Amino acid sequence: MSKQPIGIFDSGIGGLTVVNKLRMLLPHEHIIYVGDTKRNPYGSRTPEEILSYTRDILRFMTQQQVKLVAIGCNTVTATAYPIVRREVPYPLIGMSRGMYTAQKISTTKTVVVFATELTIANHSHRKEALRIDPQLTVIEQSCPLLAGLIERGHLQDQAIINPIREYVKPILNTMADTAIFGCTHFPFVQELFEAFSYDRLAFIDPAHEMALETLNVLKQKKLVNTDDKQGSLRLYFTAEAQRGGRLASHLIPANEFTICQLSL
Ligand code: DGL
């Protein structure tokens, strides 16, 4: 069983930020990734739609005989995860919120979360903060345009610069000293977030916490792959697989993955 792949999925390329961190920590694991590029972005869809898409992807993961699935998507974690977590025969891990890291580094105890509309509407980061440290203040900033733009390859141009500037600006008038990427797409444009925050915010990519949590679950369940060769990485996209591959190569060398088209 430990030789079976790990499944990771997202509405598109965002969850690759999790794949990237996971491969650093667990280089021998085989990974199957699904990016639902046909139905992206998820952040402006209804919770019912997301539940149905999540079930489609988990069905595929079950057919692939994965040993565990890590959800590389905050929007799915905030909506469908509590419902589907007991529907599958393998461990299913929801996207980390990054709140443990934020709690450690914020001196003002004020943290901003940049996320999709649906994740913000769900207040999932605020709920997590209340659970781990009621002293933390969480400022919620919805960024409805970003995931779709990043998905279409706008990583540096004016189309993405303007909304990022607008989303960050009001935060500079608050006590926030720490920012969490509450959408897995956003680390693709971390440099722009940093540029418009003028060194006032320390940015946290929760993919790191997520990779550690995945490692812990694998250890607990005795599912760590102990092979000594590099694990394979297969990227499935439900539309425009070549574009997905091109964007993936911003994070992961192109000769380290294969790309496949998937219809769900
Ligand atoms: N990357 C996903 C998230 O973390 C989804 C973004 C979207 O499709 O709107 O929320």
Image: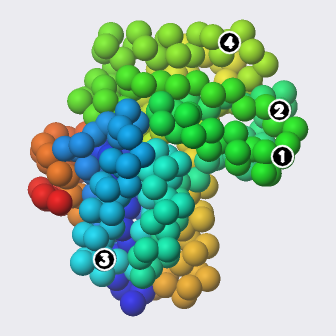
Q: Which residue is mark 3?
A: 62
- The residue type indicated by label 4 comes to Leu
Percent x, y of residue 77 = 50, 53
Q: Which residue is painted at 38% across and 23% down in the image?
A: 145
Between marks 2 and 4, how big is the CA–CA gap?
15 Å
Percent x, y of residue 8 = 38, 61
Q: Which residue is painted at 25% across and 29% down in the image?
A: 153
Q: Is residue 85 left or right of residue 199?
A: left
Q: Which residue is painted at 43% across and 74% down in the image?
A: 87
Between marks 4 and 3, how big is the CA–CA gap?
45 Å
Crowding near the residue tagged with mark 2, few <14, some 14–19, many ≥20 C-alpha atoms within 10 Å: some
Q: Which residue is painted at 38% across and 40% down in the image?
A: 46
Q: Quick check: marks 3 and 2 in contact, CB under 8 Å?
A: no
Q: Which residue is mark 2?
A: 109
Work out which residue is located at the far front of the displayed protein and give it: 48
Q: Secondary structure at mark 4?
A: helix
Disc with the residue nearer the chain's start (4 vs 3):
3
Q: Which mark is on residue 133? A: 1
Q: Which mark is on residue 172? A: 4
Viewer-side residue, 39 vs 29: 39
Q: Is residue 183 left or right of residue 53?
A: right
- The residue type indicated by label 2 comes to Lys
Q: Is residue 114 left or right of residue 99?
A: left
Crowding near the residue tagged with mark 3, few <14, some 14–19, many ≥20 C-alpha atoms within 10 Å: some
